[in-house]
Image (tube, rainbow, N blue to C red):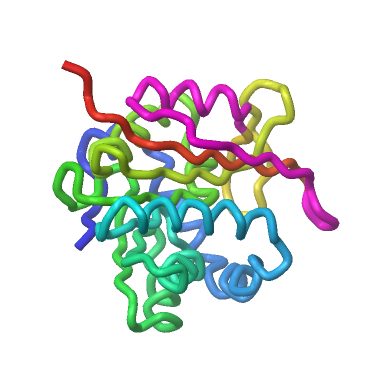
Amino acid sequence: MVGLQSSAVAESSPYLTATADAYDAVAELYADLARDSLDRLPLDRAIVAAFAELVRAAGPRPVAEAGCGPGYMTAHLRDLGLDAFGVDLSPAMIDIARKDYPDLRFEVGSMGAFDVADGELGGLLSWYSVIHVPPPELPPYLAEFRRVLAPGGYLLLGFFESEGGPVLQFDHKVTSAYRWPIDDLADLLRKEEFVEVGRMLREPLEGERFRRGHLLMRRQAATS
């Protein structure tokens, strides 16, 4: 089971309840729009496929999706051969995920505190979930990603990229969100003992507003 957020994250993150409430309010609409969203995104599918291949090659460990929403990406990971489960703040989103994908495990909780042992996971996907974390509060989440991943485990982040500018808040349709410079996110992850495997930037498609960033990282063993 993936538990609720730790007290340390909760105390420093008053936005969590607002984020959950905002997604609860639009859960059905969001799920309807998201279910087939990967169909028109070949580059996005490609980097997720590379992530899955690397995780499979590293050994039979479970994979978590942090901020899984209605579960379509968790199901995609399952279809790529991974033992995947999902966690999300929004109870309404989790209800939809459980209904749509009854063979998969979904739990209400925070990506700031997974109820798994240190080093238990072979992979972790954060697909446009860190975008809602206020920038000063992001490092503890990345530290949690490092904690739950096995040495050599893989992390894939999807996010809105700031196109050479600083971190920018923008008018996300659901709730407050941020666009990140890809180099700044990579630097934060390096401080948490991740090394970069690869990155993918793509320009916005018709109907999209912003460039999309993707970072594929590998957790290194802690240095003594």
Q: Position of residue 87 (x, y in %)?
A: 34, 59
Classify residue 157 as left or right of residue 162.
left
Q: Position of residue 127 (x, y in %)?
A: 51, 52
Residue that protrudes farthest toward the front in the picture: 57
**Foreground residue among 163 and 155:** 155
Image: magenta residue range: 180-208
Classify residue 118 as left or right of residue 49.
left
Q: Position of residue 35 (x, y in %)?
A: 59, 73
Q: Position of residue 12 (x, y in %)?
A: 32, 31
Classify residue 115 as left or right of residue 129.
left
**Foreground residue among 202 and 180:** 202
Name the quadrant of the N terminus: bottom left
Q: Is residue 126 above or below residue 34?
A: above
Question: Which residue corresponds to the image point at 50% horizontal and 41% vertical from the top-left?
Answer: 216
Residue that protrudes farthest toward the right in the picture: 206
Where on the picture, by quarter, is residue 104?
A: bottom left
Classify residue 50 as left or right of residue 20.
right
Kindly tell me whether residue 66 is visible in this rendering: yes
